[in-house]
Image (spheres, rainbow, N blue to C red):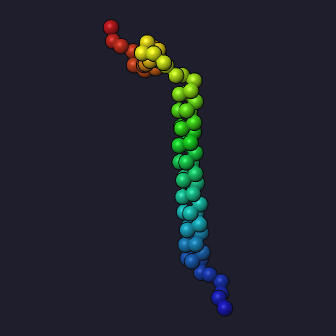
Amino acid sequence: MTGPKSPSEQDEQQGKKWYERTRYQILLFSVWITLMGFALWVILDLYIDPQTSAQKKDLVQALEVWPKSP
């Protein structure tokens, strides 16, 4: 027969539950971000598919972030 748990045992048990729940949430979020990044990469690869070197050059120029200095 076991009696009621002491407050310190209850706190420790709740801390473990919080840690496990948070760990799984972080894992699921990381997997979701990875899948969304992969899906975006595939969609952009299918949508923007340069075939010639001129098209590749134009794509790189369009994606250039920093303007060239004069």
Q: Position of residue 4 (x, y in %)?
A: 65, 83
Question: Which quadrant holds residue 60?
Answer: top left
Note whether 42 is above or below 35 in the view shown: above
Q: Nearer the viewer, residue 49 or 3?
A: 49
Q: Where is residue 65 in the image (x, y as percent from the top left)?
A: 43, 20
Note whether 27 is above or below 1 in the view shown: above
Q: How many marks?
A: 0
Q: Can the viewer see residue 61? A: no
Question: Which quadrant holds residue 44?
Answer: top right
Q: Residue at 53%, 28% (x, y): give it.
A: 45
Q: Residue at 66%, 91% (x, y): give it.
A: 1
Q: Where is residue 52 in the image (x, y as percent from the top left)?
A: 45, 15
Quadrant of the drawing holding the C terminus: top left
Q: Which residue lies furthest to the top in this view?
A: 70
Q: Which residue lies furthest to the front in this view?
A: 51
Q: Which of 6 and 23 is in front in this view?
A: 23
Q: Nearer the viewer, residue 44 or 23?
A: 44
Q: Which residue lies furthest to the bottom in this view?
A: 1
Q: Residue at 43%, 12% (x, y): give it.
A: 54
Q: Can the viewer see residue 16? A: yes
Note whether 4 is above or below 21 in the view shown: below
Question: Which quadrant holds residue 43?
Answer: top right
> In the displayed structure, does residue 30 sit left or right of residue 68?
right
> In the displayed structure, does residue 4 sit left or right of residue 31?
right
